[in-house]
Amino acid sequence: MKTIYFQCNMGAAGDMLMASLLELLDKPEIFIDKLNALNIPKIHISYNKAEKCGIVGTNMVVKVDGVEEDNIIYKGNHKHSDTEHKQFHSSHINLPDKHNHENKAHSHSKLKDICQLIDNLEIPAKVKEDAQNIYKIIADAESKVHNRELGDIHFHEVGTMDAVADIVGVCLLINEISPDKIIASPINVGSGQVRCAHGILPVPAPATTLILKGVPIYSGNIEGELCTPTGAALLKYFTDEFMDMPQIRIEKIGYGMGKKDFNAVNCVRCILGEVDGDAESIVELCCNLDDMTGEAIGYAVEVLFNNGALDVYTTSIGMKKNRPGTMLSCMCRIEDRQKFVSLIFKHTTTIGIRQYECGRYTLSRTMISRETELGIVEFKRVEGYEIIREKAEYESVKEIADKNNLSFADVIHKVYPKGTP
């Protein structure tokens, strides 16, 4: 399974994620040319190599009107110099200001303006949808934190364009790399306090904290905001699972560097490789039956299968008073447990059900149609754990055998290039 693993030991920001993904491409310069050709208003994107703690990676340079946001952070109608890239929220609540900090030269954008901007870009429809959804995650978090409607949330122009470039860039890169699964480590969010347009806030900042609801995070010994709202939203949206690094056969590694220097390498590490199927958590439900007919048990098995059981089987057992009985076993997903408990009670005579939670390893399965001398035959192909197998589907073989008046074994011998497998 083609998998991306983001290692977020130093948090994540949009530019760091984009840089780490960019390093996975064979010709990153071609991608940057395509990104600039989108003509995101006032934006120019480039990259360079940067070294942190002896590790060389990529650093993204996003300029708005020729100026990188690191050097100009807008707050109210003032310009502030600061080297902490993305350590300030780019959102601004449109509230009455007794000092009348209204500056016509400093414009803001609403969420609908940003979504329209993204919609006008010449990018695939899926990328547009992803980018707009990610911005909605950020806006929704800001609106809840400040108890305002989405329409009252304004984004500073510089922060807006910079974030749009990061978000669109990451979405395009993931679309181009096209992984089957994205996994991320628990996220280091930093510690201490952060200064933003609304004052001094704890780390992680309120909007970031809300975005990361349900995501495993931790605070290390680094002071500062390591995970930005943009980085949090990108990871929340794209990540299928948050966990420690899985067993993976590494193909490529990317280092997306942050702007600040710490005593630990300030980067997001992105690993692209193949991951075999992980153990899936399932539930096995079992009950013993000694007063049901074979027909009734058979019907119960059919009902369980029809309702989506992963597997159902019976085992002959000896019960109390030397009575022969049947143990019914039903495997299902954890979230379906209650449904199958109810079905077993309804369709059997048992008065008690045992449950066992366990892990299940599976090979990936795909169906392949092949032309043979006897016609089209459906094959099931399974692979994983360095194993690849194919087997002709029973129903397909049976249909050909009936149609050609052949035995099942004869069909199997003919449809396999080298005879019976």
Image: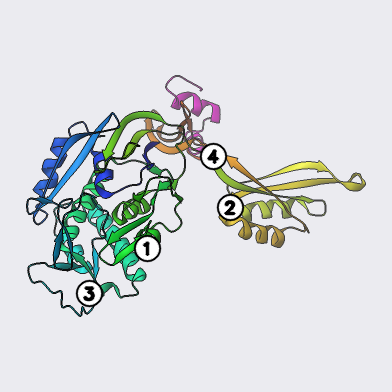
Residue 82 position, x and y percent, is 20, 52
The type of residue carrying mark 1 is Pro
Please give left or right for residue 210 compared with residue 413 in the image.
left
Please give left or right for residue 59 compared with residue 270 in the image.
left
Judged by its main secondary structure, the magenta piece is helix
**Foreground label between 2 and 3:** 3
Q: Quadrant of residue 268?
A: top left
Along the line of sight, the residue nearer the viewer: 27 or 326: 27
Tell me the distance, in whole angstroms, between the alpha carbons under discs 1 and 2. 33 Å
Tell me the distance, in whole angstroms, between the alpha carbons under discs 2 and 3. 45 Å
Residue 252 position, x and y percent, is 31, 30
Q: Which mark is residue 206?
A: 1
**Which segment did they paint magenta?**
397-421
Q: Quadrant of the N terminus?
A: top left
Q: Which mark is residue 334?
A: 2
Q: Which mark is residue 279?
A: 4
Q: Quadrant of residue 300?
A: bottom right
Q: Is residue 395 visible?
A: yes
Along the line of sight, the residue nearer the viewer: 83 or 386: 83
Please give left or right for residue 408 compared with residue 4 in the image.
right
Q: Is residue 133 visible?
A: no
Q: Sequence-wise, which precedes: disc 1 or disc 2? A: 1
Tell me the distance, in whole angstroms, between the alpha carbons under discs 3 and 1. 18 Å
The residue where tag 3 is placed is: 94
* Circle 2 residues within 10 Å: few <14, some 14–19, many ≥20: some
* Circle 1 residues within 10 Å: few <14, some 14–19, many ≥20: some
Badges 1 and 4: C-beta atoms under 8 Å apart? no
